[in-house]
Image (cartoon, helix red, strand yellow):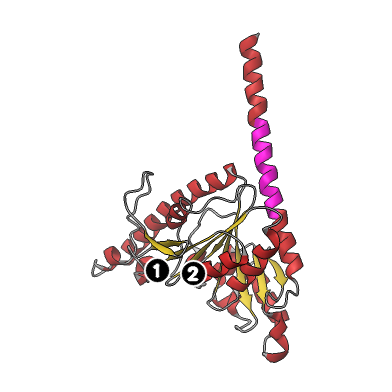
Amino acid sequence: MCSVCGCGNGEISINADHHAHDHSHDHSHDHDHTHGHGADVLSHSPMTESRLVAIEQDILAKNDGYAAGNRRLFAARSVFALNLVSSPGSGKTTLLSRTVQVLRDEFPVAVIGGDQQTAHDAERIRAAGAPALQINTGKGCHLDAHSIGHALEQLPLPEGGTLFIENVGNLVCPADFDLGEACKVVILSVTEGEDKPLKYANMFAAARLMLLNKIDLLPYVEFDVARCLEYARRVNPDLQILQLSARTGEGMGAWLDWVRQGQQTAVAQQIEVLETELAAARARLARSSS
């Protein structure tokens, strides 16, 4: 876990529209920038197991607080937020590029990308026609809710639409860090081992949907699809699974429909909240008038 591996303390930067923006510490909101990652943790020697557990719990508790704030914001703006997680090279950016090319004409979409270096992925998403912002984590191996909150200060929320968060390529730490998303979507390509769901069980257990990508390459690789799906459902019996190729477009329709359904549900839930609040306001007005 990050409190042990020492990733990325104080190295986050946010890149928007081709220029870097330092993750400044004097924003007007009350985000606390002491993440507790890395340097502070590793400076304690020797480190007892009980102290490591306490630090990990503190890090996750702080993150969960920021995530709750992000989630309230998403709900208030009817934003369906997805946290896309995978190993490096699974095809996340190609998948997102094809996804936003289709959905941008149906409802608002936006992308926050996470990588240790470069803004290449955000540039590809912008070229596909969607607003995108890149978070560079330096040595950090995952995005956290705090950095997402700061990114939202620069990226207009896709109100009534979908926000895709492309996490750093890593199947370990992102499993533990809630970003305020509606759900995690784990992407596995057939160029990886079919036993990934067993090796990285926490991630597949945390996800609601698994996308098996690059199925166009199945004739050329040794990959047992049935075994992979069995492993995934062994870890998470409720996991939804879709098979597709982001490169050829095969199977993309089911994925796009899944996103559309989530977006419609987010809008419907906010309408229900507003109608409840309106009914309560009318009841108070009627009581005050009687």
Q: Which mark is residue 168?
A: 2
> Distance from label 2 to label 1 (Cα)?
9 Å
Amino acid under disc 2: Val
**Residue ID at (67%, 26%):** 279
Are the residues flagged by discs 2 and 1 in contact, CB closer than 8 Å? yes
Amino acid under disc 1: Gly
Q: Quadrant of the N terminus?
A: bottom left
Please provide percent x and percent y for residue 66: 45, 50
- The answer to whether residue 119 is seen in the rendering is yes
Instruction: Give the crowd class for mark 2: few <14, some 14-19, many >=20 residues within 10 Å.
Output: many
**Residue ID at (56%, 55%):** 181
Q: Is residue 24 left or right of residue 100?
A: left
Q: Which mark is residue 140?
A: 1
Predominant secondary structure, magenta span: helix
Regarding mark 2 in the picture, which secondary structure is present there? loop
Please provide percent x and percent y for residue 173: 46, 67
Please provide percent x and percent y for residue 40: 27, 63
Displayed quadrant of residue 275: top right
Q: Which mark is residue 231?
A: none
Q: Is residue 69 left or right of residue 6?
A: right
Please provide percent x and percent y for residue 104: 67, 58
Regarding mark 1 in the picture, which secondary structure is present there? loop
Magenta region? 262-276
Displayed quadrant of residue 205: bottom right
